Amino acid sequence: MSGLLTIFCLQNKAPIYPGKPLDLEFGRDSFTKQPDGRLLFSFRFADRDNILSWILTFGNGAELLEPVEFREELYRIGKIMHEKYRDS
């Protein structure tokens, strides 16, 4: 499969994405349960926008591990959101 290999660490032990368990959506081979209960998720996404928008659906329940260059982009998005809602 082509695309950008992406690795996330998901805090939620049974995450749901568009009404389906993630293992049904992406396959059980995409996940490795970590000793602390988190799920290490590895999948190839089509492009940067797909990766960023998908991880943002988990709020603070996921951490993007790779590609590391997208972590800065997530930080920038979070900073913009913080400024937007800071005085709410």
Image (tube, grey):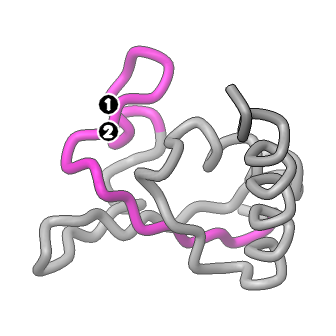
What is the total number of numbered labels drawn onto the structure image? 2
Mark 1 vs mark 2: give the one in front.
Answer: 2
- SS for dot 2: loop
1 and 2 marks in contact (CB < 8 Å): yes
- Residue 61 is left or right of residue 71, and the answer is left
- SS for dot 1: strand
Q: Range of the magenta residues?
A: 4-25
Q: Amino acid at mark 1?
A: Pro
Q: Horizontal and vertical percent for residue 44?
A: 68, 61
The N terminus - image quarter: bottom right
Report the residue at 22% width, 41% height from top: 14
Q: Is residue 45 above or below residue 38?
A: above
Q: Horizontal and vertical percent for residue 47?
A: 88, 55
Q: Nearer the viewer, residue 48 or 62?
A: 62
Q: Horizontal and vertical percent for residue 22?
A: 38, 38
- Residue 7 is left or right of residue 79, and the answer is left
Q: Which residue is mark 2?
A: 15
Report the residue at 43% width, 64% height from top: 41
**Mark 2: few, some, or many residues within 10 Å (few <14, many ≥20)?**
some
Report the residue at 74% width, 47% height from top: 82
Q: Is residue 67 above or below residue 84?
A: below
Res. 21 mark: 1
Closer to the N terminus: mark 1 or mark 2? 2
Among the 4 quarters of the image, the one containing residue 20:
top left
**Mark 1: few, some, or many residues within 10 Å (few <14, many ≥20)?**
few
The residues bearing labels 1 and 2 have C-alpha atoms spaced at a distance of 6 Å
- Residue 3 is left or right of residue 12, and the answer is right
